[in-house]
Amino acid sequence: MTSRTVKSMGWTATLLAVVFAVVGFLPKTHSSRRPNVILILTDDQGYGDVGIHGNDILRTPNLDRLAREGVRIKEFYVTPLCATTRASLLTGRYNQRTGVLWPFLGAEVLRHREVTLAEALKTAGYQTALIGKWHLGRYGKYGPLTHGFDEFLGFRDGMIDDYFDTPLEHNGLPARISNYITDALTDAALRFVESNRSRPFFLFLSYNAPHIPNQVPLKYEQEYTEKGLSPHLAKVYGMITCLDDGIGRILEALKKLDLEENTIVVFLSDNGPQMESSRQMQQFRSREWRRMDAMWKGVGRYNANLRGEKATVYEGGIRSPFFARWVGQLPAGKTLDVAASHIDLLPTLLDLCEVPFPEGPALDGRSLAPALKTGRGEAPVRTLFFWSDAPKTGVGPRLGLNRRNYAVRRGPWKLVGGKELFDLSRDPYEQKNLAELQPGRVKELQEAFDRWAREVVPNEDLVRLPVPVTGEDTPSIMSNLFRGGTVIDIAWARLHGQGLRYGYDKLIRDKITGWQDPNDFIRWHLDVEREGRYEVILQYGCGVADAGSRIRIASGDARIEFVVEPTSAVDVWRTQGVGFLDLKPGLTTLDIRVLSKPGKSVMDLHEIRLRRVGDIWPTAPADTRWNGTKEI
């Protein structure tokens, strides 16, 4: 080997060393691999429920860190309620277009015509998972596995009654966790991230905290009772700190796995906080809710001085924290003073991931990627709409919409309910109504809302989907337990009569009560997808003095009759098979009517289940217990 060759090799080695050093400092996102996405959504966490937003009592160091290391959006809007926000986040469209109008009554089902963020990313090669709350259709036909998610661990309904040792679902099979639910969801998220570290993934981590019930490990509650807070507010703040700890574990895992620079992390909440003074709480005057007053007392809390709370379209009900971090790609510590919204999330994330917008329904949102990348952006002249009214229901399948709880924002101007006008640039807390001084602007914004409402809900009339009777093992709404057969959701019923109403066993709207008029009846619309003989299993309560009512259950030409037997009290539940119905495929109805009633009341109906004869339901599925060690 000549000296010239040795010298040449020396220069080559030096050059390669420099190249390797430079490459080592380049962001890993410059590779051909698309970035991972972790979307973290909390439930009923208000704008003021974060330390960095001025809450000097609540401890949220990891959320504060996420805000400091990423970009904040000061005025980020969602809807006032759970399901409707979720529909818009996943589709980039106003929830009314997606069929999701309300959190229950069968008006919470995301239509299959919609293209979700999970579907778009899955098509681009992402592994997708939803861990936590779904709330966009409780039947498997409408569940997350049919909307682009490869994995699902959580619950399909809007809430659960117990956060410890909770029955959940893993890909259609029962899965009972063995610890506090927030910790279990975090554990599952960590395992998903670790097992998919070598390929692009989308994780939708949908925590159910700090939604009621107010339950949290004792150490978190004590942290705030020691500060002098009421026990129930201490629980709420403890729930938030617990999920903050979980988010901290996820951020540390990304660092440990060398995924920080290739993972977009977005955090937000689904609506404002639910508090003692909330409009939603004030309308609940039933005996069941009055006995639970203690849960609500003392949970009024700091909400950054914003007016309103969950269920309202004032700023306190629809403003959400929004933090987006992508190390090396988004500037740290920037705050965007722009009005943005839940409908913007899908186009923004697809833009950041360089994934083409999917073919399908037109988007309402716009990409915020340019503003996030620069940390700058002027508020564009755009109009944002908010509409959250309970649907009008009847015996038929159609739903109408009221027009009471709505708002329109254009620039700094916001019209609420057609009667209150605020200039948010001067009055961010919505204290001074300028409607009488600005009638022209009121008229302009009201006309904009009217045009938009006619567009998103043609004729303000939508069809509520029928209950799919498939023989699927549907989990019970009040316990999430799988018992075989299809649960006919109580809240999807059409209540015919003046006395019938929904009631609460614990916290979930899970019984029909007030059945005193024998002319009242209950009707469901069904779509029988599997023909066969179905056993009808009721769960009901009936006091001894009211026992003996004769009931008819009918579907098409099939019908059965039975006599209501007593339970020890009206709110003590009896599970009883009452007969068999031969169901033919197609659309039909299921009616429960009274033939005779000897007492004052008929019964309180807790659950109705149709279990197909011949189907075999395993008593102990392999996936019956998930303790944090199972791969997902």
Image (cartoon, grey):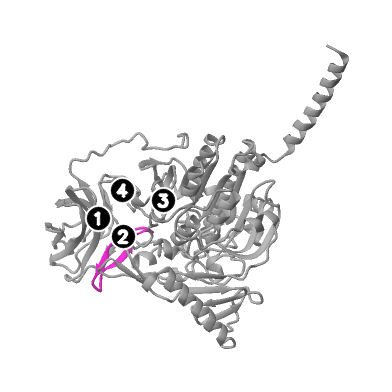
Q: Give the class, few, some or many, for how many residues have Cα within 10 Å of label 1's Cα (few <14, many ≥20).
A: some
- The disc, 1 or 4, on the residue closer to the chain's N-terminal end is 4
Q: Give the class, few, some or many, for how many residues have Cα within 10 Å of label 3's Cα (few <14, many ≥20).
A: some
- The disc, 4 or 2, on the residue closer to the chain's N-terminal end is 2
Secondary element under disc 3, as helix, strand or loop, is loop
Amino acid under disc 2: Leu
How far apart are the alpha carbons under marks 3 and 4? 19 Å
- The disc, 3 or 4, on the residue closer to the chain's N-terminal end is 3
Please identify the quadrant where the N terminus is shown: top right
Secondary element under disc 1, as helix, strand or loop, is strand
* Nearer to me, 227 or 287: 287
Which region is colored magenta? 490-510
Name the residue that disc number 1 marks: 527
How far apart are the alpha carbons under marks 2 and 1? 9 Å
Q: Which mark is residue 465?
A: 2
Q: Which mark is residue 162?
A: 3
- Do labels 1 and 4 touch, CB within 8 Å? no
Q: Is residue 116 above or below residue 410?
A: above
